[in-house]
């Protein structure tokens, strides 16, 4: 067993009732563990990670809490272990009971850390001002409140590729491929791939299909005739209005999302458990 205590940072947003209730029990459990050093607790105020060091960041909540935690860490990405208090919990796939039952393994560092692609999204306004955002799941350009079909131009490394006509476009990482992109008909990408998938939303054509390309490319999205209500959505949490002269550039981020995985945790097993991906339905003869 390691001689050094396990250094933990906990993110538990007390503004959310189910997280507040879970943290009450969770904190008592941690206080009783002599092999743990609790470095810091973020109860919703927004912890500054720039000078913190820890072995694990334990996030109480759901996948949305993990997405927020990634952006909060910025360039200081630390391994995350998600405790699922929500419904699906694809990233936060460990229950509070599982955390307690396997805590000795965690303290012995009997886990591995998987690096996942993150993206940098640069929104350049028509007047030249640029805003940069870090994300993990996806970038969406949506007709939103416009309630109209929009045309979105896609260029890769500066080369015009195609124009999507429909309700919008999703540009997703492999981690995000099981989120909004999947519901729009996009493919499932293995989470450790270095690739992006572009999925049209309700395309007004029979020939538009999702496109997968390298994470080393720069993807540019524009909507030259964007009606009022057109919106840029980042990880389902940041919403920004788009105008006709705005440009969106998406590229691989300089940092990676670090997910701590306990032994016997399987990506395809998670697909089976969380998405009901059980293969061919079996029928009994009558």
Image: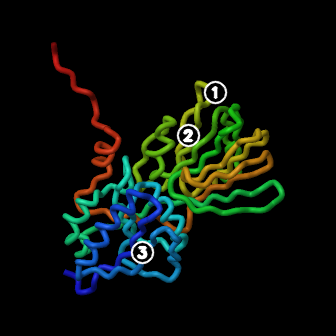
Residue 130 occupies quadrant: bottom right
Report the Cα–Cα distance between label 3 and label 1.
48 Å
* Residue under label 1: 204
Q: Residues within 10 Å of mark 1 (few under 14, many from 20)?
A: some
* Residue under label 2: 199
Sequence-wise first label, 3 or 1:
3
The image shows residue 80 at horizontal and vertical percentages of: 39, 66
At 63% from the left edge and 58% from the top edge, which residue is drawn?
A: 121
Tell me if 48 is positioned left or right of 22 in this view: right
Sequence-wise first label, 1 or 2:
2
* Residue under label 3: 41
The image shows residue 226 at horizontal and vertical percentages of: 76, 41
Report the Cα–Cα distance between label 3 and label 2.
38 Å
The residue lying furthest to the bottom in this view is: 3
Position of residue 77 relative to residue 264, above or below, is: below
The image shows residue 284 at horizontal and vertical percentages of: 17, 20
The nearer-to-camera label among 3 and 2 is: 3
């Amino acid at each position: 067993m390691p001689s050094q205590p396990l250094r933990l940072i906990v993110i538990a947003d007390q503004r959310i009732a189910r997280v507040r209730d879970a943290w009450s029990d969770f904190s008592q459990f941690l206080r009783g563990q002599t092999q743990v050093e609790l470095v810091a607790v973020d109860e919703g105020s927004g912890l500054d990670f720039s000078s913190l060091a820890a072995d694990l960041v334990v996030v109480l909540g759901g996948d949305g809490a993990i997405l927020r935690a990634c952006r909060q860490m910025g360039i200081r990405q630390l391994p995350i272990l998600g405790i699922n208090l929500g419904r699906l919990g694809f990233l936060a796939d460990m229950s509070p009971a599982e955390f307690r039952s396997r805590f000795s393994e965690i303290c012995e560092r009997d886990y591995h850390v998987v690096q996942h692609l993150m993206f940098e999204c640069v929104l350049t306004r028509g007047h030249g001002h640029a805003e940069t955002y870090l994300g993990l799941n996806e970038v969406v350009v949506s007709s939103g409140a416009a309630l109209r079909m929009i045309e979105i131009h896609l260029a890769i490394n500066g080369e015009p590729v195609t124009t999507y006509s429909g309700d919008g476009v999703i540009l997703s990482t492999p981690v995000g491929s099981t989120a909004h992109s999947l519901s729009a008909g996009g493919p499932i990408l293995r989470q450790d791939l270095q690739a992006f998938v572009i999925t049209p939303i309700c395309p007004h054509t029979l020939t538009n299909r999702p496109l997968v390309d390298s994470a080393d490319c720069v993807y540019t999205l524009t909507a030259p005739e964007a009606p009022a209500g057109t919106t840029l959505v980042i990880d389902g949490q940041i919403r920004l209005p788009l105008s006709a002269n705005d440009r969106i550039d998406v590229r691989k981020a300089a940092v990676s999302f670090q997910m701590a995985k306990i032994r016997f945790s399987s990506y395809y097993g998670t697909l089976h458990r969380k998405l009901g991906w059980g293969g061919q339905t079996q029928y009994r003869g009558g």
